[in-house]
Amino acid sequence: MGKLMLTNLPVFLRIGLFSVILAVLGIIYFSFKNNGKGCLLSNNKEKNKKEITKEKKKTLTLNVVQPIPLDVKNPSQIVPITNCNKIIPVFYKNPIDFKGLSKKERKEKFIAYMLPQILIVNHEIEENRRIVLRIKKKFEEGKEITENEERFLNNLLKKYKVKSVNELLSRLNTNPPSLVLAQAIAETGWGTSRFYLEGRNAFGITAIRKKGNTIKMKGANIYLRKYKYVINSIRDYYYSINVSWAFKKFRKVRLTTKNPLELSRHLTLYSTLRRIYIKRIKKILRENSLDKFDKCRIDPSFIREMNYE
């Protein structure tokens, strides 16, 4: 049988066959083109999905104080306060006995010892509050929060025993440094009390029962908490103020004012001395002009950005 040659076919068949070939090629071309587009759209979807996931897992950055731990033996080694706007964030690893000092020097040294540590804790709370306010603003604007922001918020809600952001903000707050100083002065007798020296407890924080690290009050079945560092007692003081039912009115007033004298009126339940305690705190505030320390700030050079993990 001879080979089939197109030239041997009639003209009308050659035209028909050519049309079929063109049609097949057209189908192949458009099929490939559509498939290509499909892949491109699919790839874009995957890319968008990855970008959304990346946004969801975006790093949460906190401004964290880098404290300087010091193990000092006597008051002369305490870092003095020379610039209220640039307080060096020292945290002292051990309590200092201020008994042997003159009244004037004892006051000066005790404030220099306590103030940096109070400001460190204040910064921790204020930074957490700043992040929560930012998250709240996102909610109000209908924006999606990241996974890290959600985890950060949930951890604080759990810690402060609340269910809403507004409740959290009423608790996640700081006191004027002057008021914290005044209470530390009253509770430790300017750094001379047994509970401060033996238990590193600067705020007379009691324990419900003899459990864990405690120190017993002489002549009474009362136990006070014992801490590894004085700064830990500052954190615990704040937790008590910010969570306990006894200071609900205090927290409400604190949202409207940071006046230490006004706030002190609402600390009646802090001590069994009740009104006598309030008068004592006010006297300490006035006689030592402690409100001047409310403007003090941590030296910014000791503050670093850190990722929340």
Image (cartoon, rainbow, N blue to C red):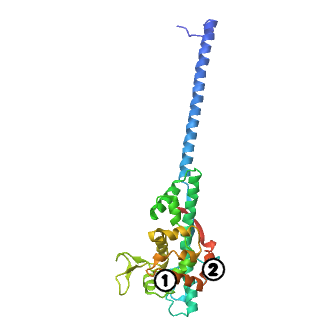
Residue 91, position as x, y percentages in the image = 53, 78
Nearer to me, 194 or 34: 194
Q: Residue at x 58, y 28 (%)?
A: 32
Could you tell me the amino acid type at mark 1? Ile
> Does any portion of residue 70 appear in the rendered image?
no
Could you tell me the amino acid type at mark 2? Lys
Nearer to me, 158 or 48: 158
> Does any portion of residue 247 appear in the rendered image?
yes
Q: Pointer 1: residues within 10 angstroms few (<14), some, or many (20+)?
A: few
Residue 159, position as x, y percentages in the image = 45, 64
* CA distance separating discs 1 and 2: 24 Å
Closest to the camera, between mark 1 and mark 2, is 1
Query: Measured along the vertical axis of the image, is residue 97 above or below residue 3?
Result: below
Say which element carries label 2: helix
What residue is pinned by disc 2? 292
Q: Residue lying farthest top?
A: 10
> Looking at the rendering, which quadrant does residue 87 occupy?
bottom right
First in residue order: circle 1 vs circle 2: 1
> Looking at the rendering, which quadrant does residue 132 occupy?
bottom right
Query: Measured along the vertical axis of the image, is residue 85 above or below residue 7?
Result: below
Say which element carries label 1: helix
Q: Residue at x 63, y 72 (%)?
A: 301
What residue is pinned by disc 1? 276
